[in-house]
Image (cartoon, rainbow, N blue to C red):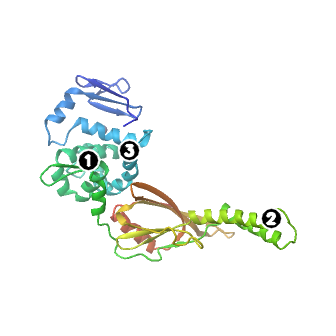
Amino acid sequence: MSHFSQILVYPGEYKNPQTGKMHKGETNMGGFMCFSWKDFVSGNQTPDDKINLGLHEFGHALRFNGVRGDSTDYFFENYFKRWLACAAKEFMKMRKGLPSIFRQYGAVNINEFFSVVVETFFETPLKFKDYFPELYKHTSILLNQTFANDGSLILNCREELMKQDASELSSDFNGAIHYNLRYNGFMVMSALFFIVGFFSLSGQGYKYPPPYILFVVAAVFWFYLEKKYTRITFHKTSFTVSKGFLILKGAHSKTLPLSHLISLAATYEYHTDNYGNTLKQESSAFITYYRDGDFYEDELYCEFSNPKFEQLCEELSNNFVHIFIKD
Ligand SMILES: [Zn+2]
């Protein structure tokens, strides 16, 4: 946790100079942590009351380090979205004041909820697993450790747990997303160099530079555009990310289990015509996915066909893919 360089330890509860209130612990975005040693020790001495000051504050530190640290826990920061998609339901329930196995303090905000989940994970893991198997699994993946049924701790289990994840859609959702080749700078440059090259070749004007150089430049722009052109197709338990539009089409296809899809952020862009009517125009989406120890983000140039796309989002969301739609 490179962002944190100092831990202040007080004998007991201490007065925070900024708030003037008595505190038991604090994890500050400024890069330090504080503990009341009395409460730190008592948190550890009662192992199953789901109150553990040390685990609670280090839960915050893990989260803040993901946001601020210079050498962050790369996996944590990226996978956290999927954890959020899974945690949202119980968190919202607690916000409404409904009872939960997590202590009520978790309803304060999502950071407190995460820390309260961490306390519960280590203090009463098997009960947690019983009540919320999915949230337990995603917390295990995030923390890269899990408890076996006999209560023993298993470390470095992240990849294995992701493999066991059986995310599934009800159908393959063909046609929910239509892809289009977005009019952009690379396309314009490619066309421009090609046209100039063509005139140069046919000798009707531009003799220099030689046309083959212009064609090569046009091709470089075109290939770059195609490399950026991403499509995603959904199957029942997996998804395929493929690149290319014309020449590179299908060249870099990768099929991954659905559990490796972290998030889908979609934007609808509205357009007003000359008569003041609102038309739905091009849309775009960003997908984040995990592959071989790394996370990738790709932009999709596409249109969504509703209601199929909305159904797809709902099902992905049920499988804890983080969905964000802006219109
Ligand atoms: Zn807290």
Q: Is residue 296 above or below residue 113?
A: below
Q: Which residue is mark 1?
A: 117
Q: Which residue is mark 2?
A: 210
Residue 276 image position (x, y, % from top left): 65, 68
Kind of residue sitting beneath label 2: Pro
Q: Is residue 29 above or below residue 311?
A: above
Q: How far apart are the two marked residues, 2 and 3, measured between alpha carbons?
A: 51 Å
Front-most of 56 and 95?
A: 56
Marked residue nearer the N-terminal end (2 or 3): 3
Front-most of 130 and 107?
A: 130
Image quarter for residue 35? top left
Ligand 1 contact, mark 1 (Cβ < 8 Å): no
Q: Are marks 1 and 2 in contact (CB under 8 Å)?
A: no
Q: How far apart are the two marked residues, 1 and 3, measured between alpha carbons?
A: 19 Å
Going by the image, does 149 lie left or right of 4?
A: left
Residue at the farthest right position: 205
Kind of residue sitting beneath label 3: Asp
